[in-house]
Amino acid sequence: MSENSNGAYLEEERTAKVRREASLKRPEGESNPNNIYIEEEVDEKVRVLTHLTPNHVLDPNDVFLVGYMKSGTTWFRNLIAGVVYGLTSEYVPFAAVWELIPNHGPRKPYYKRYQTPTYFKSHDFPRPQYLRVVYLMRDGRDVVVSLAHHMKNVYKQDVDMLELVKGRHPIFSARYEWYKHVESWLANPYNAEMIIIKYEDLKKDPLPELRRFCKFAGIERDDALLEKAVAFASFENMRERETRLGIDYRTWPKDKFFVRKGQVGSHKEEMPPEILEKFMRKAAGTLSKVGYL
Amino acid sequence: MKANPSLVYVEKELDEKIRALTHFTPNHQLDPKDVFLVGYMKAGTTWFRNLVAGVVYGLTSEHTPFSVVWELVPNHGRRKAYYKRFSTPMYFRTHDFPQPEYRRAVYVLRDGRDVVVSLAHHLKAVHKQDVDLAQLIKGKAPAFGGTYKWHEHVEAWLSNPYAAEMLIVKYEDLKKDPLHEMRRFCQFAGLERDDALLEAAVANASFEKMREREARLGFGRQHWPQDQFFVRKGQIGSHKEELSPKLLEKFMREAAGTLRKVGYL
């Protein structure tokens, strides 16, 4: 740890530089889904020195907790850390949850395998390697509202909700639209074993949803543990832990709550009618198919 | 420039890459607030590490694999080049002698006679060959770089050459009254924890529970053979049955002074 802010800044700069250079070196047509390219020689050394596993080395038994951004994957990650690993204490730092249920994404080249199956979180579209999937679904209208808040906090500038509705944002490399994500997972092109869990059902009555999860994952957990996991990941407790311990998300500003509102139906107050109309033009079919209309 | 105590040398360019790609921290970058759980091998540091993971991070569930404990309360040793910083302070486990960077240390002390017996079992399991107890008593084993004697380790820490803040916890006291010792630990570390949590941590790190978890989930240690229990016996006074009078006498020749000083004689 750098002991002064200047030192910390240098470390951040260096990190950004190394990662930028690595992403530029990525060869065309590489089967590794990482955006970050690591030369074989470096990769071997990293593996020996850290005992980490490259992101593209997965086990067919691994389970992926997938959802479009702001669909409740962070909440679900905390629930699953409780259910699978028994992490239900107020003293568990968020960093431990992120570590045990690691993100599987194109910007994270390594993870630590604590056990098999490993449970990953992902915002990705279907992949041939994702063979067991829990798809988290949330009303797309609430998702867009939440995404606008998220982007505003991360980039510290106003977000055009209309552009978000069109699936456009400077950080999205392609169009990243809610209904496309949902439809591609409903189509399940690689025949993954899959269950769908709705954010709204998880809010209303979490226990039956967690029991479905356990059955799907093939793990036996008693209701007492499930209840503890639900309490651990309740909005109030997560917010309290965020205040006391920090959320430990590298890109998240320290002066904002990541655990923001966690409500159902925010779009009714926060989404202007003309934007809602634009959203519905493309997403209404999907919303009605999955029961939100 | 600060000397890097790691035996693993990593070139600067590679080191920068590793840090950027993994968000790990090099072993020699420590915080003055970090706490080191120190003990000679087989003095109970693995047990203590589990207790501390329960007390500090609330890991008290039968579903938490040992590998999580090893990661949250990482080993600080010369063969390990990086660690992940989950919080500040971090709690590290180490078998090392005093180091200038170890500013806050909990020294886990165990009767050296039991330690030697336990160490013989340990080395036999790891290296799959018989161990010469007479050599161990001289502080010699193929796995040790130099000599590594119990009484030298204890004396080095008692002399506390770098004036670390320090607490001594005896294995035998921990066995007898774990709650009391964990309250002392909390006070030392500046943590407020209620007795319910301490009791849960003690229960989860009991010999029976640790052995059951080892059988069910594995031990999650790279070098430990999977067909042997790491959590072997955890008893006080094993040397009375397992150390011959002749070997005991050899051990006592060097270690009796230290044993007496810390109350084992």
Image (cartoon, coloured by chain):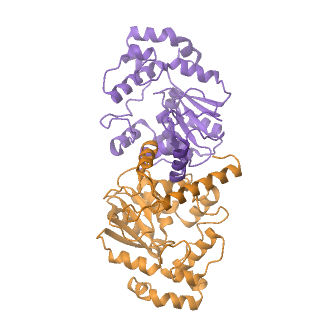
Chain colours: A orange, B purple
The tally of labels here is 0
Evaluate whether residue B118 shows in this view. Answer: yes
Q: Nearer the viewer, residue B183 or A77?
A: A77
Evaluate whether residue A265 shows in this view. Answer: no
Task: Indicate whether B213 appears above or below B242.
Answer: below
Task: Indicate whether B157 appears above or below A8.
Answer: above
Q: Whole-percent x and y of residue B138?
A: 45, 14
Q: In the picture provided, is A165 more to the left or to the right than A218?
A: right
Residue at (35% x, 20% y) in the render: B131
Q: Whole-percent x and y of residue B87?
A: 59, 48
Q: Nearer the viewer, residue B50 or B67?
A: B67
Query: Residue A90: which quarter of the image?
Result: bottom right
Q: Whole-percent x and y of residue A164?
A: 54, 80
Task: Indicate whether A255 appears above or below B181.
Answer: below
Q: Whole-percent x and y of residue A165?
A: 53, 83
Q: Nearer the viewer, residue B38 or B187?
A: B38
Q: In the picture provided, is A118 more to the left or to the right than A246?
A: left
Quadrant where the N terminus of chain B is found in the figure: top right
Task: Indicate whether A36 appears above or below A53.
Answer: below
Residue at (40% x, 15% y) in the render: B135
Query: Residue A15: which quarter of the image?
Result: bottom right
